[in-house]
Image (tube, rainbow, N blue to C red):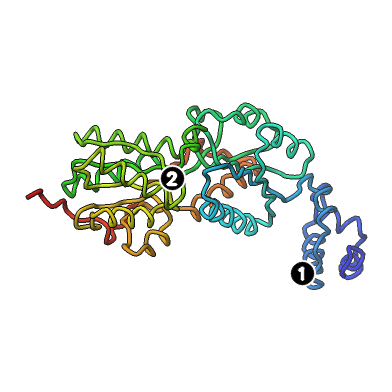
Amino acid sequence: MVKITDVARHAGVSPSTVSYALSGKRPISEETRQRVEASIRRLGYRPHAGARALASNRSNVLALVVPLRAGIHVPVVMQFAVSVVTAARRHDHDVLLLTQEEGEEGLRRVADTALVDALIVMDVQLHDPRLPLLRTLDRPSVLIGFPSRPAGLTCIDLDFKAAGELCVERLAGLGHRVVALVGSPPEVYVRGTAFAQRVVEGFTTAADRGGLVSCVHPCDASPAAARRVAEQLLREQPALTGVVVHNEPVLEPLIDAFEQLGLRVPADLSVTAICPDELAGNVRVPVTSVALPSTEVGTRAVELLMRKLGGADVPEATLLAPRLTERASTAPRTPAP
């Protein structure tokens, strides 16, 4: 293993000079710096992580806070996590994944131990109890999600309200007048999870604006629950011809349930969803959907954090516009005979 003394010997300088070149704590001539850097490249020297952290007062580690609460669809959460890790590595940072539900106490513990330079926080609630602490921490943070009062925070996410509106507007454009939202599991709404509430808000706003008959039904993430919701919807709204699904695990079971109950997709029932593109495209009846831009959100969250660590100003709010892709699950409403 190449040591700092090897670099010093190769460059013809003292080990302390190499240390100064790495840390920038003391000025050295440009010619000496270039010579040291050339030796580092030639020998393939990599500073020890602990020494580098001491020299720079940085750990080069980001915390990704994503409590795996009930009702969370883990595969989708992991897509966001992978995008954060990938983007962080491009900035020479590692990621500490925190999945326990520890709330404010967990955030304070991580911040106080200097384990991480900054934090990315997911599963944001409208009235999130972690927000007062995040506003006062001496480490920068970025939220993937928007609380009800985001002032003083840096937030990024898909515009879920606009996504809900877009799905309804597409159905209305095809002539559908009775629509339903099959939403996240009930506990997600009980917690006040921001993205789920925004979808409901957008769905309801667009339906009311268009004069549509509408209803919202939370749904547990199981085929049996999908069947129960489909049966309930057809009892309560027999004229139903359009459905928006915001619950990845029940997307295909719900289509199966409606078809078993006598409604063909899309001949009798048009279905749209808010979900990852790969899921929407691989359902037995490919589903018209608004994509979850996990790669873009994770990448941009890291970039915002890197800019904050560098002392740059960043926008408080970054909302990504929804993108709807037409697939085989939607068609114009067939007038009743």
Kind of element beneath mark 1:
helix
Going by the numbered disc 1, the residue's amino acid type is: Arg
Percent position of residue 13, x then y: 90, 63
235 horizontally vs 56: left or right: left
**Residue at far bottom of view:** 42
Question: How many residues crowd around disc 2 within 10 Å: few (fewer than 14), some, or many (20 or more)?
Answer: many
Location of residue 255 by image quarter: bottom left
Q: Which mark is residue 182?
A: none
Question: How many residues crowd around disc 1 within 10 Å: few (fewer than 14), some, or many (20 or more)?
Answer: few
2 horizontally vs 289: left or right: right
89 horizontally vs 276: left or right: right
62 horizontally vs 17: left or right: left
Marks 2/1 in contact by CB < 8 Å: the verdict is: no
Residue designated by label 1: 41
Q: Residue at x 38, y 46 (%)?
A: 321
Sequence-wise, which precedes: disc 2 or disc 1? 1
Location of residue 204 by image quarter: top left
Going by the numbered disc 2, the residue's amino acid type is: Leu
Q: Is the residue 5 above or below the residue 74 in the image? A: below
Q: Residue at x 29, y 42 (%)?
A: 233
Percent position of residue 150, x then y: 51, 30
